[in-house]
Image (cartoon, rainbow, N blue to C red):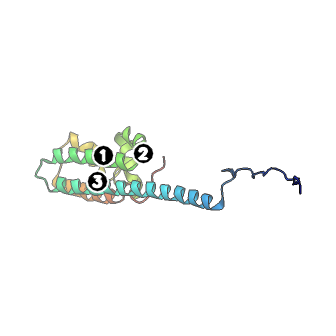
Amino acid sequence: MEQQELPLRDIHLPEPVGWWPLASGWWIALFALVVLTVAVYLLVRRWRRRTVIKLALSEFDSLEAAALPPAEKLRQLSILLRRAAMSADVRADVAGLTGEDWLRWLDGPLDRPDFSAGPGRLLLTGPYQPVQEGSLAELFALCRTWLRRVPGHDREPSR
């Protein structure tokens, strides 16, 4: 008996599966990765900012307790406030402020003019006149309150 050839066709494989569009599991994983990355970034920024404020408060306490002449205490307090402000808020917004503008900016977190029209004026006038211990104590109390409410301490700064 003679063998007949069957009318068969070659095997055709299906097209390879493409990588696009992604399956729903990949979309979920990608979304979770983005959310996790943003959360870690925000937590690190918040942690760093709180650490800066804790360090500033620690330095503030040691400055307040230091046995320095009032003029030197005032100078170092001014430097400390400037450094804390630049660390907590947008550096470019704070670095160039001087005089009355600086005092008004310091008034911001307190919602009162304690720097521009109160004991905080000593930051401007102190280097040019004798400083009384009582007025220096008021200034230190005001600065402690300000450091606890420093811009960016409880919120993210606008960038």
Q: Residue furthest left?
A: 67
- Identify the residue position indicated by label 3 in the image: 119
- Tag 3's secondary structure? helix
Q: Secondary structure at mark 1?
A: helix
Determine the CA span between mark 3 and mark 1: 20 Å
Q: Which residue is mark 2?
A: 90
Mark 2 is on which residue type?
Val
Q: Are marks 1 and 2 in contact (CB under 8 Å)?
A: no
Query: Would you call the spot at circle 3 few (<14 residues within 10 Å), some (14-19), or many (20 or more)?
Result: some
C-beta proximity under 8 Å, tags 3 and 1: no
Q: Position of residue 88 (x, y in %)?
A: 37, 50
Question: Mark 3 to mark 2: distance in Å?
Answer: 26 Å
Residue at mark 1: 83
**Amino acid type, label 3:** Pro
Q: What distance separates the C-alpha of mark 1 from that of mark 2?
A: 12 Å
Q: Nearer the viewer, residue 48 or 155?
A: 48
Comparing 147 with 24, the one in front is 24
Q: Mark 3, mark 1: which one is toward the viewer? A: 1
Q: Is residue 68 or residue 85 the one in the foreground? A: 85
Where does the image place residue 152, in percent across and percent down from the top left?
41, 54
- The earlier-in-sequence mark between 3 and 1 is 1
**Residue neighbourhood size for the residue with mark 2, other residues' Cα within 10 Å, grouped as few (<14), some (14–19), many (≥20):** some
